[in-house]
Image (cartoon, rainbow, N blue to C red):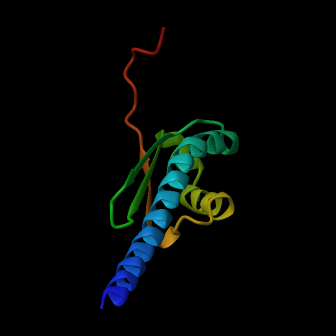
Amino acid sequence: MSKSRITIIVIIAAVAGFFSYRFIVRFIHFIKLGQTLPEYLRDMIGVKPSVHCSVAIPGKYDLKVGLAKDILQREKDLKKVVENYIKDFYPELPIDKMEIKVYELPEKSGEDEE
């Protein structure tokens, strides 16, 4: 009886370890994506966007990219560019569990104009 109990505990620990490892690796790559994506988009469109990343525990990833209105009108397929970047450089991230939103940043007031 004790031998089968130990076997079950080892199997449960192995399964939990596997899923924990997979979640940690995806989380680390998602954090790296949040750091490298603004630079990539700056090279592609000439303006560094605002990027916000969030992760929910069950494995849902939210990625929000904010740009000015004129840039959004100029770049129609920005969501596809982001998806292709993720597929090329971060293939371990699940695109089907990721929600990518491209939104318009509010216009800045006259504080920046000097």
Q: Nearer the viewer, residue 55 or 104?
A: 55
Identify the residue at horizontal 57%, vertical 36% (top origin).
Answer: 48
Outermost residue, top direction?
A: 114
Q: Nearer the viewer, residue 34 or 3?
A: 3
- Quarter-of-image position of residue 8: bottom left
Residue 35 at what x, y percent from top left?
55, 41
Q: Nearer the viewer, residue 5 or 47?
A: 5
Residue 86 at what x, y percent from top left?
60, 60
Residue 27 at what x, y percent from top left?
47, 55
| Residue 51 left/right relative to 75 | left
Q: Is residue 34 above or below residue 99?
A: above
> How many labels, in total?
0
Identify the residue at horizontal 62%, vertical 60% (top origin).
Answer: 90
Identify the residue at horizontal 40%, vertical 84% (top origin).
Answer: 7
Q: Quadrant of the N terminus?
A: bottom left
Residue 25 at what x, y percent from top left?
53, 59
Q: Is residue 27 above or below residue 3?
A: above
Outermost residue, front direction?
A: 2
